[in-house]
Image (cartoon, rainbow, N blue to C red):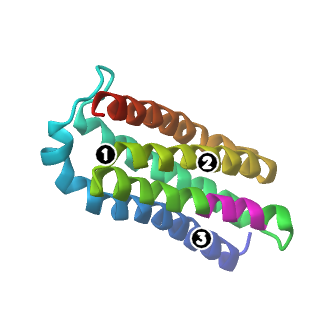
Amino acid sequence: MSDTTRRSNTLRLIVSIVICHMAGVFGSAFTTGAIPTWYAAIKKPGFTPPNWVFAPVWLALYTLMGISLYLVWREHTRNAKHRVALAMFAVQLVLNAVWSAVFFGLHSPLAGLVVIGALLVALVLAAVMFMRVSRPAGLLLVPYVVWVAFAAALNASIWILNR
């Protein structure tokens, strides 16, 4: 591998990870203020993790997402399979960021449930599509799929408890 290719790959990896973490930065703008106020005051199910768990989990997940994105971007060709996979990844990433704005920013567990449902569908599709381009890329999204499924159950429970 040439030095130019190595530098290009390193830059793509960094950009991929930063793009994914930016979704988290966007979401945190809505989350940070709501945690000690609105979120602290609503009813939550017994399986709700302590607040301190969320930041390290999301940090790890956004990093894995970035590495996954890089693996597909690195394999990217001009064929439709790659373009559709990257587009579906972008859709799920936008839905990820929008969920925080809806759930925490609008204080709406019901609207959050709709968004996280769409996120879960888009994410599973993205993971399957990534798997077809790069098996490791698809597998790196599995913990994220599991976490979003858990978050959807938590979101649904919060909606039910606070209707």
Q: Main secondary structure of the magenta part?
A: helix
Please give the name of the residue rendered at 74% of the width and 69% of the height, measured from the top-left corner.
1
Q: Nearer the viewer, mark 2 or mark 3?
A: 2
Task: Tell me how far mark 3 sits from mark 1, CA to CA.
Answer: 25 Å
Q: Which mark is residue 55?
A: 1
Q: Which residues are magenta?
A: 83-90
Judging by the rendered image, the residue that carries numbered circle 3 is 12
Quarter of the image for residue 81 reads bottom right
Answer yes or no: do the residues labelled 2 and 1 have beta carbons within 8 Å? no
Task: Name which of mark 2 and mark 3 comes first in the sequence.
Answer: 3
Question: What secondary structure is found at the residue carrying circle 3?
Answer: helix
Quarter of the image for residue 40 reads top left
Task: Tell me how far mark 2 sits from mark 1, CA to CA.
Answer: 20 Å
Residue in front for this viewpoint, 25 or 161: 161
Question: What secondary structure is found at the residue carrying circle 1?
Answer: helix
Query: Is 43 placed left or right of 102 in the picture?
Result: left
Q: Which mark is residue 123?
A: 2
Question: What secondary structure is found at the residue carrying circle 2?
Answer: helix
Looking at the image, is 127 positioned above or below residue 102?
Answer: above
Looking at the image, is 36 positioned above or below residue 82?
Answer: above
Dot 3 amino acid type: Arg
